Every structure is written in structure tokens, then in C-alpha cells.
Amino acid sequence: MKHIVSIKRAVLSFVTCAILLSLLTTAFVAFAEGFDLSKYSNDEILELLDQINNEVVKRGLTKTATLAKGTYIAGRDIPVGSYVYTCLATGSDWGNVTIYSDRGNGKQLMWEVVSAPEKDEERETIFITLNDGDQLKSGVSFSLTVGSGIIFK
């Protein structure tokens, strides 16, 4: 009789473990596939984006890279994404900032003239988006910051 009870307990433990493993696997697969945002309204999506941006800033998840003046290709030299470009020119330095599609052989997407700040001024910043293959060319040293907490209302 004791062996039958032990076998029942073993079977029950095995079934319980199998069910838990199945639930965990299902939850993991659902999480790995991402969230289905299609059921949310535009206003709800914008509210969620606002909350995420605030949390990124709150947690200090911003990252900044300092780069020398030059030409960079998105997807090769710089990760594809959206950034805050900050001009690091000093003194009387100035330069052009341009973005071209198709590794510089395509259409001009953006052009700005940037310069060192005057006394008591902040450094110039530009919000840019680099898609795969875009060429970013800067005539001055600069920094790119991702996750800077820019929030559009």
C-alpha cells in the first residue's frame, strides 16, 4: 500500500512539474514574441510611449558616444536609430552636418550648419534618425545620444 501511495505522489509531482513547465514555456514564448499593441488606440500608444520615455530617463539608460568629424554609415559605423546630435565644436569652429541616403549616393535627407556656442549659450543639438545605409557627415566633432528622453506631445 505504501508503494502505491509513493507512486501516486511521484505521478502527481511529475504531472504538477509538467504543467508548470508548460505554463512557463507558454509565458516565455508569448513574451519573446513581443507585445500585441494593435489593440490599443493611438492615444493609448502615445501615453505608453510617454511612460517608457520617462522611465528611460528616470533609470539613466541614456548612452552617449563622442565621434570625430568625418563620414559614418548607419548600420555599419553607427547603429541604426534615432539620436540627439550635439555639436562639440569649440572656439570659432563650425561645420555642416548632412545625412544622405544610399551610403551617400542617394538623396540629401538633412543639412544643418552647426557652430561652437557663443558665451553663455548651450551647445547646438539636432534630433536625427539614421536608417540602414544612411550616410552621416559632420564637419565638426560631435556626440550622439540615444535614449535622451525626448518626449513628443
Image: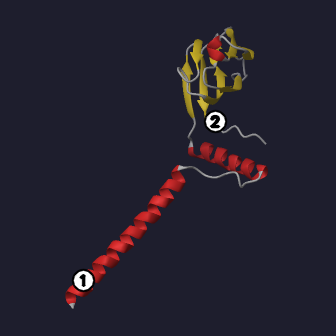
| Scheme of image coloration | secondary structure
* 33 up-or-down from 60: above or below: below
Image coordinates of residue 46 in percent, x first then y, are: 74, 47
Of residues 99 and 63, the one drawn nearer to the viewer in this rendering:
99
Q: Are marks 2 and 1 in contact (CB under 8 Å)?
A: no
Residue at 45%, 62% (x, y): give it: 24
Give left or right: position of 75 versus 41: left
Residue at 68%, 17% (x, y): give it: 99
Q: Quadrant of residue 147?
A: top right
Q: Tell me, yes or no, if residue 125 can be seen here.
A: yes
Of residues 62 and 132, the one drawn nearer to the viewer in this rendering:
132
Q: Quadrant of residue 53?
A: top right
* 41 up-or-down from 76: above or below: below
The residues tagged by marks 2 and 1 sit, at their Cα atoms, a distance apart of 60 Å
* 153 up-or-down from 4: above or below: above
Name the amino acid, label 1. Answer: Ser
What SS does tag 2 mark?
loop
Name the amino acid, label 2. Answer: Ser
Residue at 56%, 27% (x, y): give it: 79
- Disc 1 marks which residue? 6
- Disc 2 marks which residue? 148
What SS does tag 1 mark?
helix
Of residues 132 and 90, the one drawn nearer to the viewer in this rendering:
132
Of residues 114 and 16, the one drawn nearer to the viewer in this rendering:
16
Q: Quadrant of residue 78?
A: top right
